[in-house]
Image: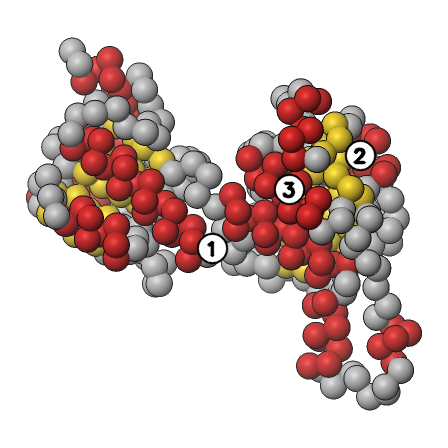
Amino acid sequence: MKVLILAPFTKHALDQLRQSYEITHESWLPDGILQDPIDLGNRLNDENFQALVVEGDFVLKETFELAPNLGFVGVCRGTTSQIDIQDATTHGIRIANTPGRNIHAVAEHTIGLIYALGRRIAESDSYVQSGEWSSPLGAYNTLRSTEINNKVLGIVGFGNIGHAVASLANAIGLNVLTYDPKVLPSETERNGAIWSDLNFLLESSDFVSVHIGNQAPDDPLFDAEILSKMKRSAFLINTSTPDAVDHHALAAAVKQRQISGAALDVHPTHPLEPNSPLLGLSNVILTPHIAGATEETIERHSEMMVENLLAFASNEEIPFLVNPAVLEIVSE
């Protein structure tokens, strides 16, 4: 079997696969160059690849039509939004992903942002780096912060990442409330969280962390009305999806001190547009969509994808199959 891997992959995982298969590895990183879907389809056909593994590349209807020998596409992500799943299924192509590969990474980054906001770490660094630290006592007056211990963290969205954040939050002394209409109150207890309705969570939390799925871009959950329900001393953290928060409403809330600040790792564009209303605000921390970018995330998705590929090649049950309906087509 010939496999084209366009995702970052560990040497150990590649060595495992090379024992049995012909592997071509060309990670889209570090240059960030994505394949044209039509060119990719032509290459898959010309070089007779039976399996493809991607992380950032788009694999569309045109790709499948041009690659009749392709039987498997692996996506080294939890989401598969860049893959035409329906058309893949029609062509009898199995799609597999790596769910949960970055749970721990995103949870840790979230906790880091909570500390950075509460203890004003980014502001303090800027204060020193810019030369403002001219008086031994100046920072004691201008950069006094608040302790994290015994504060209230409200988690909106209690999936796998929300659960991981709750576990870490409990370990550092935060009291955790959670809101998720799809989760039963009893399901929150194992992570030390207390189920809450959204209004109570917003009114009670010192930090509100968002961990929800994709939203309609024109219907963010955190709009001006929702933001107005937060405590004036509270901070908002979003490491989930940019569409969860109205960035213009958030900028206004921060400027008017309706809330104390915010930290975001997800944005409408990558990179952030230079006219973003959140740029230049001292009490807003912006990170470049790197919450899940760890060496361990690559190790994890490599191991999971090896499982997927070995199962596909052996015609066994694929552990992380996304489109089980394809099995009816390939069995005909």
> Which of the 4 image quadrants contains residue 135?
bottom right
Label 2 belongs to which residue? 201
Report if the CB atoms under discs 2 and 3 are less than 8 Å apart: no
* Left or right: 155 in relation to 289: right
Name the residue type under label 1.
Ala
Return the residue at label 1: 293
- Residue at 78% across / 54% down in the picture? 148
Q: Distance between the residues labelled 1 and 3?
A: 20 Å
At mark 3, the secondary structure is: helix
Decide: few, some or many residues near mark 3? Use Cα within 10 Å; few <14, some 14-19, many ≥20: some
Nearer to me, 272 or 161: 161
Whether residue 213 is visible here, answered yes or no, is: yes
* Disc 2 secondary structure class: helix
Residue at the image position 38 percent from the left and 38 percent from the top = 98
User: Which quarter of the picture shows residue 46?
Assistant: top left
Neighbor class of circle 1 (other Cα within 10 Å; few <14, some 14-19, many 20+) is few
**CA separation, marks 1 and 2?**
29 Å
294, 58: nearer the viewer: 294
